[in-house]
Each structure stands twice: as structure tokens, then as C-alpha cells.
Amino acid sequence: MTLKQITSRINQWRRYRVSVRELSRLSDRELNDLGIGRGDIEYVARKAVRSA
């Protein structure tokens, strides 16, 4: 694995953690308004990082 690939993976992981943290802070009502269940937060964050 090259340094560029390692850096890229670390940045993806950081974006994932930020997304999970921000979504976790929302209330159930706010998540529902977004169409996200509390159990779906990690999946949504992972999907967002992959598509970015």
C-alpha cells in the first residue's frame, strides 16, 4: 500500500467518523425527517464516504 493510499483511507475514515458523530447528535424526529433510522446511521455514513 502506498503512502497516498494510506492517506486516502485515513481521510475516508475521518469523514465517516464525522458523519456518524453529526448524525448521532440529531434527535429521532430530525433523523426521521431525513428518512434515516437511528440504526441506519453507520450505513448512511459509509455510503456517503464511498460516493464522495
Image (cartoon, grey):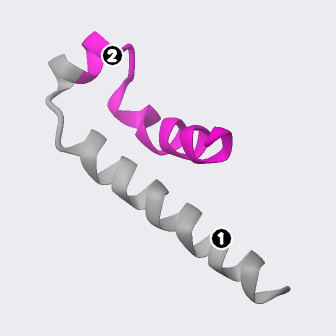
Three-letter amino acid code at disc 2? Leu
**Magenta extent:** 31-52
Classify residue 17 by image quadrant: bottom left
- Mark seen at residue 9: 1
**Identity of the residue drawn at 48% across and 55% down:** 16
Comparing 42 with 22, the one in front is: 22
Spot occupied by residue 31 in the image (x, y as percentages of width and height): 27, 23
* Drawn side of residue 21 relative to residue 8, left or right: left
Spot occupied by residue 14 in the image (x, y as percentages of width and height): 45, 66
Spot occupied by residue 47 in the image (x, y as percentages of width and height): 61, 38
Dot 1 crowding, Cα within 10 Å, few <14, some 14–19, many 20+: few
* Drawn side of residue 43 relative to residue 40, left or right: right
Residue at the disc numbered 2: 34
Above-or-below relation of 47 to 6: above
Comparing 39 with 10, the one in front is: 10
* Drawn side of residue 8 relative to residue 3, left or right: left
Classify residue 50 by image quadrant: top right
Distance from the alpha carbon under mark 2 to that under mark 1: 27 Å
Question: Of helix, strand and loop, which one carries label 1?
Answer: helix
- Mark seen at residue 32: none
Comparing 23 with 2, the one in front is: 2
Question: Of helix, strand and loop, which one carries label 2?
Answer: helix
Decide whether residue 13 is among the magenta residues. Answer: no
Number of labelled discs?
Answer: 2
